[in-house]
Image: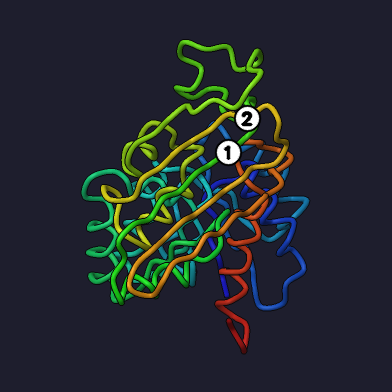
């Protein structure tokens, strides 16, 4: 399978490291902006020697596109690939909080007679949540708790010194759509949970900066006709990017390997 990887940052590099010896998977292209090409070539030479570093997904010879570059890459690269009939795996699920983007992805996939897959990323239980939706969900709440430094560069810094926090502090409370819009690099999980469950406007979200934790903690509480469940995950952050859980990379690799594995669960 010939694969185009969009993005060669922390997630993309970690993915290349994990699949470099996988039989049946060939990274044929690494798609990055022109200003990132030199750094991407250095990574590709080490982890994907046969890959070409390009600024757009090649028009021919690609069997699958994997997006690991952030929200802008979906409109720039994923939508055109879907229209051409190339299946895509999307990691930046938080982008789907933008009005109309989920519908655009669906329309592009239908036009190309293909499919776009949204990975679960840093959270588990998405299969159970999506199944529970069939019977009827009444409430879904997501709580994200991370160390203060993981919230730097976000609206959490407005009006507070994250380095000086002595106690846990709620930095956001609202809907999943609002969370994903205000914290796009931290709230992919909120968007994923909402898309599997009650939707972006009916899923409630709390984001917390807590100096007492060193891991990224994700909690989902759901109730409905099926009963109820509570899921708590304590994820180690990705070493190269504390805003991202390492499980996000593993989730992308699992989805990728599932395209060629003879048995998938």
**Labelled disc at residue 145:** 1
Name the residue at 35% across, 58% down: 195
The answer to whether 185 appears left or right of 82 in the picture is: right
As helix, strand or loop, the secondary structure at mark 2 comes to loop
The answer to whether 157 appears left or right of 82 in the picture is: right
Query: Badge 1: how crowded within 10 Å, few (<14), some, or many (20+)?
Result: many
Q: Nearer the viewer, residue 121 or 193?
A: 193
Tell me how the rendering is colored: rainbow
Residue at the far bottom in the pictured view: 262
- In the depicted structure, whether residue 121 falls above or below residue 265: above
Disc with the residue nearer the chain's start (1 vs 2): 1
Name the residue at 64% across, 72% down: 25
- In the depicted structure, whether residue 28 falls above or below residue 41: below
Q: Quick one: quadrant of the C terminus?
A: bottom right
Name the residue at 23% across, 70% down: 111
Q: Circles 1 and 2: CB distance less than 8 Å? A: yes
- In the depicted structure, whether residue 10 falls above or below residue 166: below
**Labelled disc at residue 174:** none
Residue 210: quarter of image:
top right
The answer to whether 259 appears left or right of 155 in the picture is: right
Query: Badge 2: how crowded within 10 Å, few (<14), some, or many (20+)?
Result: many
How far from the left and from the top, in percent, is residue 207?
49, 35
Q: Quick one: quadrant of the N terminus?
A: bottom right
Q: Nearer the viewer, residue 100 or 138?
A: 138
How far from the left and from the top, in percent, is residue 247?
65, 55
**Labelled disc at residue 210:** 2
How far from the left and from the top, in percent, is residue 139?
34, 57
Residue 88: quarter of image:
bottom left
Name the residue at 51% across, 17% down: 157
As helix, strand or loop, the secondary structure at mark 1 comes to strand
How far from the left and from the top, in percent, is residue 127?
47, 72
Q: Nearer the viewer, residue 146 or 181?
A: 146
């Amino acid at each position: 399978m010939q694969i185009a990887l969009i993005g060669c940052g922390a997630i993309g590099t970690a993915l290349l490291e994990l699949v470099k010896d996988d039989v049946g998977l060939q990274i044929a292209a690494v798609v990055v902006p022109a200003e990132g090409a030199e750094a991407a070539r250095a990574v590709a030479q080490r982890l994907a020697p046969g890959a070409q570093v390009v600024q757009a997904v090649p028009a021919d010879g690609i069997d699958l596109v994997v997006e690991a570059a952030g929200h802008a890459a979906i409109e720039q690269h994923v939508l055109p690939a879907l229209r051409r009939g190339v299946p895509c795996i999307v990691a930046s699920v938080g982008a789907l909080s933008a009005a109309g983007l989920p519908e655009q992805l669906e329309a592009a996939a239908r036009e190309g007679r293909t499919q776009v897959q949204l990975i679960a990323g840093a959270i588990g239980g998405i299969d159970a949540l999506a199944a529970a939706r069939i019977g009827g969900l009444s409430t879904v709440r997501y709580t994200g708790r991370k160390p203060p430094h993981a919230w730097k560069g976000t609206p959490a810094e407005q009006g507070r010194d994250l380095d000086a926090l002595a106690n846990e502090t709620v930095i956001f409370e609202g809907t999943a759509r609002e969370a994903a819009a205000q914290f796009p690099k931290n709230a992919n999980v909120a968007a994923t949970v909402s898309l599997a469950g009650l939707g972006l406007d009916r899923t409630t979200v709390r984001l917390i900066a807590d100096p007492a934790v060193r891991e990224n903690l994700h909690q989902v509480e759901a109730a409905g006709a099926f009963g109820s469940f509570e899921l708590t995950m304590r994820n180690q952050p990705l070493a190269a990017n504390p805003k991202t859980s390492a499980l996000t990379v593993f989730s992308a690799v699992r989805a990728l390997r599932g395209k060629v594995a003879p048995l998938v669960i």
